[in-house]
């Protein structure tokens, strides 16, 4: 199951799975943010652009998770 599907079913997850999912999403967010910054600071615009798309998806996923948790 994809992360986004898991977020959409967040209320049905047991507490351990919910904690694991939250950690997975937070780790992916930090990782993609760092990847974008590294490429951008290295003036690798093509790689930075690709990393930005991935980072933007992680931002949206984090927002969905925040809504699901509230």
Image (cartoon, rainbow, N blue to C red):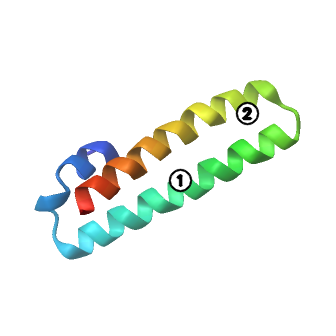
- Where the N terminus falls, by quadrant? top left
How far, Cα to Cα, is label 2 from label 1? 15 Å
Q: Is residue 35 above or below residue 44?
A: below
Please report the residue visible at 21 percent of the width from the left and 75 percent of the height from the top.
Answer: 15
Please state the total of marks drawn on the protein image.
2
Residue denoted by label 1: 29
Q: Kindly give the residue lying farthest to the left in the view shown.
A: 12
> 70 or 26: nearer the eye?
70
Please report the residue visible at 43 percent of the width from the left and 57 percent of the height from the top.
Answer: 25
Q: Is residue 52 above or below residue 9?
A: above
User: Which class describes the residues within 10 Å of circle 2: few (<14), some (14-19), or many (20+)?
Assistant: many
**Nearer-N-terminus badge (2/1):** 1
Please report the residue visible at 39 percent of the width from the left and 46 percent of the height from the top.
Answer: 61
Q: Is residue 9 left or right of residue 49?
A: left
Q: Is residue 24 above or below residue 58?
A: below
Residue denoted by label 2: 48
Q: Is residue 14 left or right of residue 23?
A: left
Q: Is residue 5 above or below residue 53?
A: below
* SS type, badge 1: helix
**Residue 17 seen in render:** yes
**Residue 2 seen in render:** no
């Amino acid at each position: 199951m994809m992360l986004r599907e898991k977020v959409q079913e967040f209320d049905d997850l047991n507490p351990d799975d919910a904690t694991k999912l939250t950690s997975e999403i937070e780790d992916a967010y930090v990782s993609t943010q760092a990847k974008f910054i590294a490429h951008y600071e290295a003036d690798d615009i093509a790689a930075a652009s690709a990393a930005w798309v991935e980072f933007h998806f992680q931002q949206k996923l984090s927002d969905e998770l925040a809504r699901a948790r509230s």
